Amino acid sequence: MKQSSTFRLSVLVFGFAFLYIPILSLIVYSFNKSRLVTVWGGFSTQWYGRLLDNRQILDAAWLSVKIAATNATGAVILGTLAGLALARFGRFRGRTLLSGMTTAPLVMPEVITGLSLLMLFVVLDSALKQAFGWNLERGFTTITIAHITLTLAYVTVIVQSRLSSLDDSLEEAAMDLGARPAKIFFVITLPIIAPALVSGWLLAFTISLDDLVITSFVSGPGASTLPMVIFSKVRLGVSPDINALATIIVLLVTIGVIAAGIFMARQEKRRQRDMQMAAAAK
């Protein structure tokens, strides 16, 4: 029994070390005075200062954040509607098609998704030009639409799973008391599934912020996101200011995960308290 516990602990330690030692080394070398990532030249924060003066990276980071936030919000709205339809409306005409369309991006290679979206935007640009004389410039709008197409599937699965495990008696009791469906959704259903919505939003935001393949297909001149800029720089060699940028991103992600965990823990405690009060009232 003791040997089994030691083996499990060793596997756990090895797994965490394999995952997090590269990240920790990246953070450490972001404070390296030397430009060479393999030589430690002393502690310095000069690369953070140079990063703040790098307009290309700052513009790309701001564009990526705007796209990710817009994408996450749109994916949560559409994914909630799709998950609600799949979990609450039972069997209806077109359910299989809707389910297949929302889950297809989960198994579709990103190269195929990016290529198909590129062809869609080319055809749409030609149609708009012939009909109205408009040009569809590939940039913020096309990247956001492409990312929503990808992340919508993840949000739908999360929301549908949460709704499937939700106790219908709360909604049925509200309907018996005369509440309308819209009020039931906003007053009862939405607060209960709020942790799932937060999880879906964060997941969609992270996927969008990290995407490179699909973005490369649907972006245009002057619309380079942060992953595209980093990828182009890394091919010429790892620069210390990239390490500084990665350190800042890790810090922001850590803060976001901790804040989301605290929020979801509070929501779960509130839900359990409400259920206990409802059971006591019976």
Image (cartoon, grey):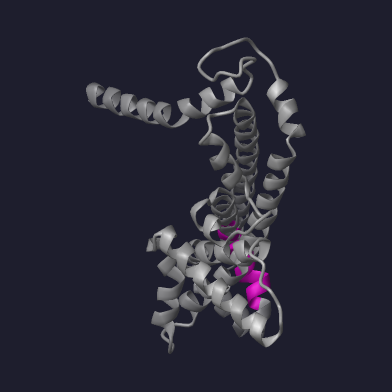
Closest to the observer, 130 or 139: 130
Instruction: Name above or below for residue 29 compared with residue 243.
Output: above
Q: Is residue 128 left or right of residue 160?
A: right
Q: Can residue 163 be seen at all in this image of the molecule?
A: no
Q: Residue at x 55, y 48 (%)?
A: 210
Range drawn in magenta: 184-197
Closest to the observer, 9 or 136: 136
Residue 136: x, y in percent?
Answer: 66, 72
| Quadrant in the picture for the N terminus | top left
Q: Can residue 97 be seen at all in this image of the molecule?
A: yes
Determine the image quadrant of residue 233: top right
Instruction: Name above or below for residue 135 compared with residue 46.
Output: below
* Majority secondary structure in the magenta region: helix
**Residue reaching furthest to the top:** 42
Determine the image quadrant of residue 72: bottom right
Q: Residue at x 60, y 57 (%)?
A: 201
Closest to the observer, 1 or 120: 120
Residue 155: x, y in percent?
Answer: 52, 63
Q: Residue at x 69, y 52 (%)?
A: 63
Residue 274: x, y in percent?
Answer: 61, 60
Determine the image quadrant of residue 81: bottom right
Instruction: Name above or below for residue 181 compared with residue 215.
Output: below
Instruction: Name above or below for residue 168 compared with residue 265.
Output: below
**Residue reaching furthest to the bottom:** 93
